[in-house]
Image: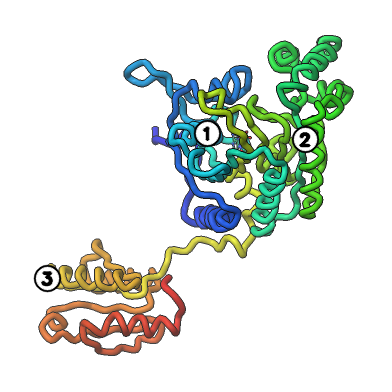
C-alpha cells in the first residue's frame, strides 16, 4: 500500500500556497501598523500547559490533544492552540519587563484530534495575536478594527462579528449555578453530552449544536442579565468603542467559547458560507488570569485566532488572489556540451542569481537538443548554449526565444544584457 498523508492533514501545493502567502504577508504588514511583533513558539509543549490553561473539562483537553510521552516519561503535547504557548513564553522570557503592554502575533500549525470534515482538520493553521498587559476595552476594539481591515483588505465582506461577555470570577459562578439549576430541571430533554456538561461545565451547553437542545437553550437565562457592575461597564464601553470605529457587531449572549480561560469580552467572526456548524472564521476574547494559571505574574490578556484553512476556503475562487499555478519561466536557460562547459555554466548561473536573475540548468537532459526542448517547455525568455568555442573565445550567443533573435556578448555583458532585456518582459518569472 502507498504511504499517504494522515487523515485530517493536508499538503498545501504550489498553486494553493500562493494564496496562503498573500494572507500571511497581508497579516504581517497590517499587524505591524498596530504594533505587533512576531513570535514563534515550539509546536511541542508540556501537556500541563494546556491542561491548566484551556481547562480539564473542555473538549480540547478531554479528547482532542495529541499527547505522547517522551523517553523520560514526561507528557508532551502537540499544541492545540497558540495563546497558552505565547503566554508561557511571555512569562519565561520576562517580556513584561520591557513595556507595560506587549503585542505579539504568530502563525503556524495547531493539532486537534477532531473528526475531519470540511473546515475542520487535525492539523490546521492559525494566525493569532495577543495583547498582554492591558484590560482596556479600547484595546479590544482596536483588535477588532485590525481584524476588520484585515478581512476587508483581502476582499471579504460577508462576515458577521458576534460579541458577548462571559463575566468574571465575581459574577460567573452565580450565573453558572443558575444555569445548572435550569438545566437540571430539563435534563431528560437534553442530549447525552449536555446532560454530562450540566454537571461538569454548564456554560458549554450554550454552544451545543444538537437540534433537540436548541429550544431549551433558547429559554435559558442570559449571562448578560447577570454581569457584575464592572463587567457590565467593561462590556458597554467595548461596544461603544466598536461603534465609534464604525464596526458593526451583534451581541450574542449564547456565545461562549471552547476554552475555559476566557472571561469578559468574547467574540467570533462567522461566515454563513462556511456552513452551519463550522461557521467560525476566527474567535477570541479576554483571558486575564491565564498567566497566573500557569505560574506567571498577574497579567491581563486579550487575543484572537483565525483559522487559515477556513479563510482560504472563503477566499478561494477569487481569481485576483489566486492565478492557476504555472511553474515560473527562467530568464536565462544555460545549455552545456560536456563537463568543462557544465562547470562554466554553474559559475555563470551563480553570477546571474547573485544579480537576481532566474537562471536554469537542466542536469538531466543529455543532448543539447533535449536541453533546448526543456527550455521551450519551461518558456525560458533566453537561452545560451556553452560549448568549447564559447569557452575559448569568451563570446556567448544569447538567443531570445520569442523570435529566435541572437546576439553575441562577452561573459561580463551577460548580466547587464538580461537585466536590460527584462524591461521588455517585466520582472523575473
Ligand atoms: P479556537 O482556537 O477553537 O478558538 O479556534 C479559532 C479558529 O481556528 C476557528 O474559528 C477556526 O477558524 C479555526 N479552527 C479551530 N479548530 C479547527 C480545526 N480543527 N480545523 C480547522 N480550523 C480550526
Residue 285: x percent and y percent?
67, 36
Q: Is mark 2 within 8 Å of ligand 1?
A: no
Q: Is residue 271 visible?
A: yes
**Coordinates of residue 140 in the picture (x, y in percent):** 69, 43
Query: Secondary structure under badge 1?
Result: helix
Give the spatial CA distance, label 1 vs label 3.
57 Å
Q: Label 1 neighbourhood size at 10 Å, few (<14), some (14-19), many (20+)?
A: many
Mark 3 residue crowding within 10 angstroms, few (<14) / some (14–19) / many (20+)? some
Viewer-side label of 1, 3: 1
Whichever of labels 1 and 3 marks the residue nearer the N terminus, that label is: 1
Q: Quadrant of the C terminus?
A: bottom left
For the N terminus, the quadrant is top left
Q: Are marks 3 and 2 in contact (CB under 8 Å)?
A: no
In this rendering, would 8 be left or right of 143? left
What residue does disc 2 label? 164
Q: Earlier in the sequence, mark 3 or mark 2?
A: 2
Marks 1 and 2, how far apart in space?
23 Å
Q: Residue at x 68, y 49 (%)?
A: 142
User: What residue is disc 1 on?
Assistant: 87
Q: Residue at x 66, y 29 (%)?
A: 262
Please, is residue 15 above or below residue 421 in the view?
Answer: above
Q: Residue 124 sits in which quadrant?
A: top right
Amino acid at each position: 500500500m502507498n504511504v499517504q498523508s494522515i487523515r485530517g492533514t493536508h499538503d498545501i501545493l504550489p498553486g494553493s500556497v500562493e494564496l496562503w502567502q498573500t494572507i500571511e504577508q497581508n497579516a504581517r504588514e497590517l499587524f505591524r501598523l498596530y504594533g505587533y511583533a512576531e513570535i514563534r513558539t515550539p509546536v511541542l509543549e508540556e501537556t500541563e500547559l494546556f491542561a491548566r490553561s484551556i481547562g480539564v473539562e473542555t473538549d480540547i483537553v478531554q479528547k482532542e490533544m495529541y499527547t505522547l510521552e517522551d523517553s523520560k516519561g514526561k507528557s508532551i503535547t502537540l499544541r492545540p492552540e497558540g495563546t497558552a504557548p505565547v503566554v508561557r513564553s511571555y512569562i519565561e522570557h520576562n517580556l513584561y519587563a520591557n513595556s507595560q503592554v506587549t503585542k505579539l502575533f504568530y502563525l503556524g500549525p495547531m493539532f486537534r484530534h477532531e473528526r475531519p470534515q470540511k473546515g475542520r482538520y487535525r492539523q490546521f493553521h492559525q494566525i493569532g495575536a495577543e495583547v498582554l498587559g492591558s484590560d482596556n476595552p479600547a484595546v479590544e476594539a482596536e483588535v477588532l478594527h485590525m481584524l476588520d481591515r484585515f478581512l476587508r483588505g483581502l476582499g471579504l465582506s460577508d462576515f458577521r462579528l458576534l460579541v458577548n461577555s462571559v463575566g468574571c470570577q465575581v459574577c460567573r459562578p452565580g450565573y453558572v449555578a443558575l444555569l445548572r439549576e435550569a438545566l437540571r430541571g430539563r435534563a431528560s430533554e437534553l442530549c447525552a453530552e449536555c446532560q454530562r456538561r450540566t454537571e461538569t461545565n454548564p456554560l458549554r451547553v450554550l454552544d451545543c449544536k444538537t437540534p433537540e437542545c436548541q429550544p431549551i437553550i433558547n429559554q435559558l437565562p442570559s449571562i448578560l442579565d447577570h454581569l457584575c457592575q464592572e463587567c457590565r461597564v467593561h462590556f458597554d464601553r467595548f461596544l461603544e468603542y466598536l461603534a465609534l470605529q464604525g464596526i458593526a457587531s451583534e451581541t450574542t449572549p449564547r456565545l461562549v467559547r471552547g476554552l475555559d480561560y476566557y472571561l469578559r469580552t468574547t467574540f467570533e467572526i462567522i461566515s454563513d458560507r462556511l456552513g452551519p456548524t463550522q461557521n467560525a472564521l476566527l474567535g477570541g476574547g479576554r483571558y486575564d488570569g491565564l498567566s497566573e494559571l500557569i505560574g506567571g505574574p498577574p497579567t491581563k490578556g486579550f487575543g484572537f485566532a483565525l483559522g487559515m484553512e477556513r479563510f482560504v476556503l472563503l477566499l478561494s475562487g477569487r481569481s485576483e488572489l489566486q492565478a492557476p499555478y504555472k511553474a515560473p519561466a527562467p530568464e536565462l536557460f544555460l545549455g552545456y556540451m560536456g563537463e568543462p562547459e557544465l562547470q562554466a555554466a554553474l559559475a555563470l548561473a551563480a553570477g546571474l542569481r547573485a544579480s537576481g536573475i532566474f537562471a536554469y540548468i537542466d542536469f538531466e537532459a543529455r543532448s543539447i537538443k533535449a536541453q533546448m526542448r526543456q527550455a521551450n517547455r519551461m518558456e525560458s525568455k533566453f537561452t545560451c548554449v556553452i560549448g568549447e568555442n564559447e569557452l575559448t573565445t569568451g563570446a556567448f550567443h544569447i538567443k531570445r526565444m520569442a523570435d529566435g533573435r541572437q546576439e553575441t556578448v562577452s561573459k561580463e555583458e551577460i548580466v547587464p544584457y538580461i537585466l536590460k532585456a527584462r524591461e521588455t518582459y517585466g520582472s523575473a518569472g
